[in-house]
Image: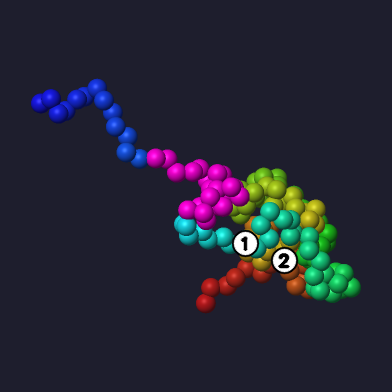
């Protein structure tokens, strides 16, 4: 039992260099002197801000004259929604709840800021009973007949 001494501790490993130390120039040259394999790779655009590079396409984009933007709901449609909602005695919040949308969506449609979505438009049409698309904007919707 004399061979097992509980009070002494023996450590048989040595800590390697930390990540920052292993990347230093001194650590690389020391490893090369010891004959160890050292692999060095250059990362593409590492540590550089390549976000604002001027390329050939930049000139084409600058000379482009077409304005790209999303079409918005017309003010005419916004007024029809507002009038139809008021005729039914609904607030924006009530109409939004009825069609399962947020009140902000109804506000955007009425003010002409919304990008038209056919699903939302059809929900609003059914809720207020007025057409919002096509040539007959503001006309009452015909009730669907069952065949």
Q: Residues within 10 Å of mark 1 (few under 14, many from 20)?
A: few
From the viewer's perspective, tell me whether residue 92 is left or right of residue 4. right
Query: Which residue is pictured at 78% across the width and 60% down the height?
Result: 52
Q: Position of residue 101 (x, y in %)?
A: 62, 52
Query: Which residue is pictured at 74% across the width and 59% down the height?
Result: 51
Q: Is residue 121 visible?
A: no
Residue sitting farthest toward the top: 7
Quadrant in which residue 128 is drawn: bottom right
Residue sitting farthest toward the bottom: 147
Residue sitting farthest toward the left: 1
Q: Position of residue 63 (x, y in %)?
A: 89, 73
Residue that carries the numbered disc 1 in the rendered image: 42
Disc 2 versus disc 1: nearer the observer: 1
Magenta-drawn stretch contains 75: no
Q: Of helix, strand and loop, which mostly describes the magenta segment? A: helix
Part of the protein shown in magenta: 14-34
Q: Position of residue 15 (x, y in %)?
A: 42, 40
Q: What element does badge 2 sit on?
A: loop
Magenta-drawn stretch contains 18: yes
Quadrant in which residue 120 is drawn: bottom right
Residue that carries the numbered disc 2 in the rendered image: 131
């Amino acid at each position: 039992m004399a061979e097992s001494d509980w009070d002494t501790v023996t450590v048989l490993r040595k800590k390697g260099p930390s990540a920052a130390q292993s990347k230093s120039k001194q650590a690389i040259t020391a490893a090369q002197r010891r004959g160890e394999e050292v692999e060095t790779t250059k990362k593409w655009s590492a540590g550089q801000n390549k976000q604002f590079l001027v390329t050939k396409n930049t000139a084409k984009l600058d000379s482009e004259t077409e304005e790209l933007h999303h079409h918005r709901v017309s003010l005419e449609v916004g007024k029809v929604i507002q009038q139809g909602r008021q005729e039914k005695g609904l607030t924006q919040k009530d109409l939004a709840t009825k069609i399962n949308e947020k009140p902000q969506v109804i506000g955007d449609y009425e003010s002409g800021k919304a990008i038209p979505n056919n699903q939302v438009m059809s929900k609003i049409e059914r809720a207020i009973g007025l057409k919002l698309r096509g040539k007959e904007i503001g006309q009452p919707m015909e009730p669907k007949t069952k065949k």
